[in-house]
Amino acid sequence: MMEEEYLSVYKCLGDITRLRILHLLQREPLCVCHIQDVLGEPQPKVSKQLAYLKRHAMIESMRHANWTIYRLPSEPGTFLSQNLKCLESLVFHESVFQEDLKRLKRVDTSAACLS
């Protein structure tokens, strides 16, 4: 991996909203509306962060009817995988990630956009 690619990954990881999104996507693929519900952030902000992550190959998207579903890459590189493991260790130290998981359990992810 070239130096620019390392910097790109670290820039993506340098924002709490993007970290929270990546953390959620480690659990399951989600549409914007579900991510928005969990984060309690406005849709434009969530969409902007998703676009940023996608542009830097940190996530993938797929169309399902009228919805766009976001997920982690089907084959994440070693560098991304290592950093996602590091992110998992934050869950035990940062309450925002624990709260996001609690909210994710309350969100109906079986809604039309994922079925």
Image (tube, helix red, strand yellow):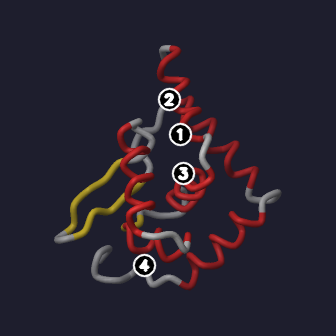
Tell whether label 1 touches label 3 (CB within 8 Å): yes
Report helix, strand or loop for mark 3. Answer: helix
Q: Quadrant of residue 56?
A: top left
Q: Is residue 82 left or right of residue 34?
A: right
Where is mark 1, residue-wise?
12
Q: CA distance from mark 3 to mark 1?
A: 7 Å
Residue at image coords 38%, 59%: 47
Q: CA distance from mark 1 to mark 4?
A: 25 Å
Q: Amino acid at mark 1?
A: Cys
Q: Which mark is residue 109?
A: 4
Tell whether label 2 touches label 1 (CB within 8 Å): yes
Where is mark 3, residue-wise?
18
Whole-percent x and y of residue 78?
A: 54, 30
Residue at image coords 53%, 15%: 3
Q: Quadrant of residue 67?
A: bottom left
Where is mark 2, residue-wise?
8
The earlier-in-sequence mark between 4 and 2 is 2
Q: Amino acid at mark 2?
A: Ser
The earlier-in-sequence mark between 4 and 3 is 3
Report helix, strand or loop for mark 4. Answer: loop
